[in-house]
Image (spheres, rainbow, N blue to C red):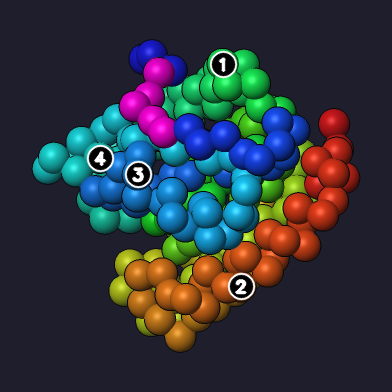
Amino acid sequence: MSPEFVHRFVPGRTADGPVLLLLHGTGGDEADLLPLGEALAPGAGLLSPRGKVLEHGMPRFFRRFAEGVFDVQDLTARTRELAEFVRAAAAEYGFNPAAVLGVGYSNGANIAASLLLLDPGVLRGAILFRPMVPLVPESLPHLDGTPVFVAAGQRDPIVPPAQTEQLAGLLESAGADVTVHVEPAGHALTDGDVAAARAWLAAHLTRPASADRRA
């Protein structure tokens, strides 16, 4: 696999400011979450790759056998590839690799959670909209204090509450600082999701990257 992705990069207002890694859902592309990124953190850098896996012509970040049944071998390889891409992009565009926060929706949230579990040094923190448990690693990483915002839908037909609870518990067991927000909604994002995530993110952006994640 090549770490190269079709992607968009929008520089931040400051070279050492935060960069949001935007990870779309099934059928999205590199432009999908740019407005969301701008709404969450005005002035932040935005790095938005397109998933390489096609499912009936729709881009995804990794393969699945059925809805909610993931190809863990492919997920693991794609997660490593995405981590390489982020590091290469930091070198190419000159942003601080310690300032990257993941923002994922659905399939994108799942691979962002996988990044946290398999390569925790890549993300300073993450906002996960409608995630599931992507995989359970053989050994938990050390996510000491890594802030994670999980947004679930109370009436989500795809992600049952048990999945949200299991993912939050898994990340907390690894040491992450997890905030769970539940909207009276389905799988689609709502204004309430965005407002809650924006407020959470603003609180964490006031802290230096080193305060969110210890070495």
Q: Give left or right: position of 206 versus 2.
A: right
Q: Give left or right: position of 177 versus 41.
A: right
Is residue 56 among what the camera can see?
yes
* Camera-nearest residue between 209 and 144: 209
10 Å crowding of disc 4: few (<14), some (14-19), many (20+): many
Residue kind at label 4, given as amino acid type: Pro
Q: How many marks?
A: 4
Residue 89 vs 206, above or below: the answer is above
Residue kind at label 2, given as amino acid type: Ala
* Camera-nearest residue between 215 and 18: 18
Labels 3, 2: front one:
3
Labels 1, 4: front one:
1
Mark positioned earlier in the residue sequence (3 or 4): 3
* Camera-nearest residue between 80 and 28: 28
Instruction: From the top left corner, tell me how far across and down residue 169 is, in percent.
Output: 65, 61
Q: Which residue is mark 3?
A: 31
Q: Most prominent secondary structure in the magenta stretch? A: loop
